Every structure is written in C-alpha cells, then in structure tokens.
Amino acid sequence: IGGDVCRLLARVASTLAPAGALIVEVEADDCDEHLSVRFHRHGGPVGAAFSWARVGLGGLRARAAGAGFRVIDTWQCGGRAFSELRLR
C-alpha cells in the first residue's frame, strides 16, 4: 500500500482470522529502504512511478509488533527469505 509496510501489515491484521497466519517474503539481507520505482519496457518508462519498500527481518520484526503481530518462524528457500507472522 504505497510502499508503507506498517500500513500494509495493519490492513492485513484487520482482515486476518484470529488464528490465521501471514506468510511474508522479506529481503535476505538486513535492508530497510523506501524508494520510488518505475517499470521500463524497450528502454522507455511504462506508467507512473510508485512507492516500494524493501525490508529485511530486523525491520519486519519492529513493524510487525507495531501492527499486533509476532514473528513465529523464518526460513530461506531458493535464495529467498520468508517469515510467518501471527496476531498476538
């Protein structure tokens, strides 16, 4: 949601069943950045720029707690990193 990780987690928390789980992909490194990105095709821009966020596990833990989640598990598979979150 506009590159706002806290807002996205809060939105998901409001729709998740009490016993539900949220699986999120995080960056494998400990990055925490917000940037503006734009798609390009054949050397030219396609559409407007939009906000994007990249967050590693450290940044996710802090934001998840703020949205009422706790990190249950983390793992890597095929060079990608994932976390399981559950509501507190």
Image (cartoon, rainbow, N blue to C red):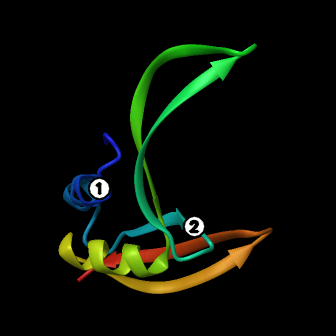
Q: Is residue 42 above or below residue 32?
A: above
Residue located 35% across and 77% down the image: 86
- Distance from label 2 to label 1 (Cα)? 19 Å
Q: Position of residue 26 (x, y in %)?
A: 53, 67
The nearer-to-camera label among 2 and 1 is 2
- Left of 28 or right of it: where is 51? left
Q: Position of residue 25 (x, y in %)?
A: 55, 63
What is the tally of numbered marks visible in this picture?
Answer: 2
Q: Secondary structure at mark 1?
A: helix
- Left of 38 or right of it: where is 52? left
Q: Which residue is mark 1?
A: 12
In which quadrant of the rendered image does the N terminus lie? top left
Q: Secondary structure at mark 2?
A: loop
- Left of 50 or right of it: where is 83? right
- Amino acid type at mark 2: Glu
Residue located 23% across and 83% down the image: 88
- Left of 74 or right of it: where is 1? left
**View extreme (bottom): residue:** 72
Residue located 28% across and 72% down the image: 63
- Amino acid type at mark 1: Val
Residue 29: assigned label: none
Q: Are marks 2 and 1 in contact (CB under 8 Å)?
A: no
Reading the chain from its start, which is encountered first: label 2 or label 1? 1
Q: Residues within 10 Å of mark 1 (few under 14, many from 20)?
A: few
Q: Which residue is mark 2?
A: 27
Q: Residues within 10 Å of mark 2 (few under 14, many from 20)?
A: some
Q: Position of residue 61 (x, y in %)?
A: 36, 80
